[in-house]
Amino acid sequence: MECEFPTVNSNKEEIKEIFETVKTIAVMGLSPDESKASHQVAKYLQEAGYKIIPVYPKEETILGEKVYRSLAEIPFAVDMVDIFRKPAAFGPIADACIERGDVKVFWGQQGLVNNEAAEKAEKAGMKVVQNHCTMVEHRALF
């Protein structure tokens, strides 16, 4: 496995602005398993006041929210996509964000980088954060 260094990334000021402006966060790969990082991070963000939208292949509800199978199925605006999927999935996720047209932030969790997908998202007008945990960053700033 080849690890990428993020060449496309927001700075701390932009990350603070992201948290101050986004309201809805689609969590790609939000596991129903409470021991998984995706579940813990989403629960934290939900408790911090964000609307969490689980995107997962199974389950009907996670954290009390309706689960969607894809970004395309979500029938309302999505401000940010928080990705807990392998970097190989970032390309199709970036395409889905671009197709939606309403996603403002493309965020790859800690340890996850795909510069090609990040560049695509950035060129489409999204802010991009890679290799950062939303929970860790939010806690540090607020």
Image (spheres, rainbow, N blue to C red):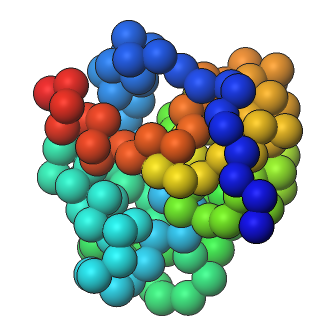
Where residue 83 sits, quadrant-wise, is bottom right
Count how many numbered circles sit on residues in the image.
Answer: 0
Q: Is residue 42 above or below residue 114?
A: below
| Outermost top residue | 13
Residue 60 in view here: yes
| On-image quarter of the C terminus | top left
Q: Nearer the viewer, residue 75 or 72?
A: 72
**Left of 71 or right of it: where is 119?**
right
Q: Position of residue 61 (x, y in %)?
A: 39, 80
Using the image, determine if residue 134 lies above or below residue 1: above
Residue at the spot 52% in from the left edge and 43% down from the top edge: 131
Q: Position of residue 36 (x, y in %)?
A: 35, 77
Front in this rendered view, residue 77 or 46: 46
Report the residue at 77% width, 37% height from top.
115
Specify whether residue 21 is in view: no
Residue in front for this viewpoint, 108 or 4: 4
Quarter where residue 100 is shown: top right
Tell me which residue sits at (57%, 39%) in the image: 130
The image shows residue 17 at horizontal and vertical percentages of 38, 15
In the image, taking residue 61 as reference, residue 113 lies left or right, namely: right
Q: Residue furthest front?
A: 2
Looking at the image, residue 74 lies above or below residue 118: below
Q: Identify the image quadrant of the N terminus.
A: bottom right
Q: Is residue 16 left or right of residue 104?
A: left
The quadrant holding residue 43 is bottom left
> What residue is at 21 percent from the left and 25 percent from the top?
141
